[in-house]
Image (cartoon, coloured by chain):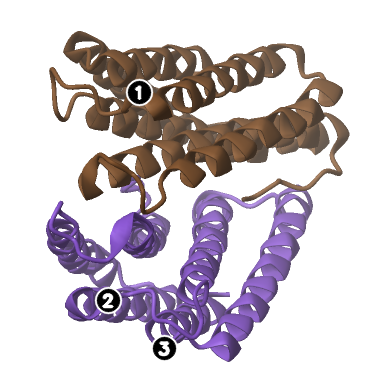
Chain colours: A purple, B brown
Amino acid sequence: MSRAVVTAIRHASTALLNADVAAATLTAAEQNTITGLRDEIEDLLPVLLARQQPFASDLRLVLAAVHMNLDMDRMGALAGHIAGIGVSRHPVLVIPPEALPTVSAMAEVATSLAEKSALILATRDPIDAMQLDLDDDETDALLQQLFALLNDDWGHGTRSAIDVAMVGRFYERFADHAVGVGWQVAYLVTGSLRTGRM
Amino acid sequence: MSRAVVTAIRHASTALLNADVAAATLTAAEQNTITGLRDEIEDLLPVLLARQQPFASDLRLVLAAVHMNLDMDRMGALAGHIAGIGVSRHPVLVIPPEALPTVSAMAEVATSLAEKSALILATRDPIDAMQLDLDDDETDALLQQLFALLNDDWGHGTRSAIDVAMVGRFYERFADHAVGVGWQVAYLVTGSLRTGRM
């Protein structure tokens, strides 16, 4: 599921930055995969809990899995939103040249956070998990940078401004959920950390 | 927690529609209450699961509680965002006159959905829970109506358009989470319904 999320955000950014319809289709396909896995996990969790009567760390695993399942499902949906906006004026690009560096940077950070959260799911390293939270500061800085461009001198019209703002917001939420996955891994390992809800 | 969410969205809409700083402060206080309850519930769930070894419907209750806890926490955060935007130009109103009817209607629907989800948590009526989903269609229609206003003839500048768009989006997400609570109640009662993730 975490690998599908990485693939989804990659395709979504390709769709966005190139008005690439094929990439948007691939994003949608990946989103379907993610939703399917979400449903599988949701069906599995009550069965696991009921049959195996897990204790302590196993119990934490189940609770963390509920959270992470929702986080990753949401990441897939946000990738879908980004791809959808990206091709909404095909073949015209939705992101005007002056916003492109910032949006591209947001796309890179989001992809990197998704990759790291997928890795952390495998390694269960709580230090790496905490690091995600710091990495995410870059997303917040980039979003501020993006919103600073969207002032009343913006020369591309109202709809364009809203599209750019929404894309920024979606990347930010995507990054927040990647951090959320990290927090759940930290909780899983240490049993004491709170979810970093945002 | 569900009552605090209702209070939060009421204060948030007052803050938004009147640039009312006191109401924004009350929203923030309510959001703190919600976050506190979220943490209490998160701490309680593993204890409940481990000590009481719940089966079947009790087990569903725990899993549903994890979901609803996240939904309601998010509703509190969204109310906070709405209030924050609402007073960001105090004493100037953020919502221009032509958008006011639509935004007011969205505020009313969001409050009503929050009230209904709080009631459904008490009654556990799965039919009412499913009805929430239908009620939410109104939110989607209102959001479309709002975005139709935000075209290139919008006369209030780029930042204003983005604020209005974000407020619309936040009400929509708030409503989605209220529906999410309803789905969890339906799951709780019937054991077979999926979460209506959005």
Q: Is residue A173 left or right of B181 when viewed as pictured?
A: left
Q: Crowdedness of circle 2 by 10 Å Cα count: few (<14), some, many (20+)?
A: some
Q: Is residue A112 left or right of B41 when viewed as pictured?
A: left
Pick the residue in front: A82 or B146: B146
Q: Crowdedness of circle 1 by 10 Å Cα count: few (<14), some, many (20+)?
A: few
How far apart marks 2 and 3 lie (CA) works out to: 11 Å
Judging from the image, mark 3 belongs to the subunit labelled: A
Residue at image location 36% in from the left, 43% down from the top: B166
Element type where label 3 sits in the image: helix
Q: Which mark is residue B97?
A: 1
Kindly indicate whether the residues beneath marks 2 and 1 are on one polypeptide chain: no
Residue wearing tag 3 = A18
From the image, state whether disc 2 or disc 1 is nearer to you. 1
Judging from the image, mark 2 belongs to the subunit labelled: A
Pick the residue in front: B197 or B191: B197
Give the residue type that dot 2 points to.
Pro
Residue wearing tag 2 = A96
Residue B175, position as x, y percentages in the image: 56, 33
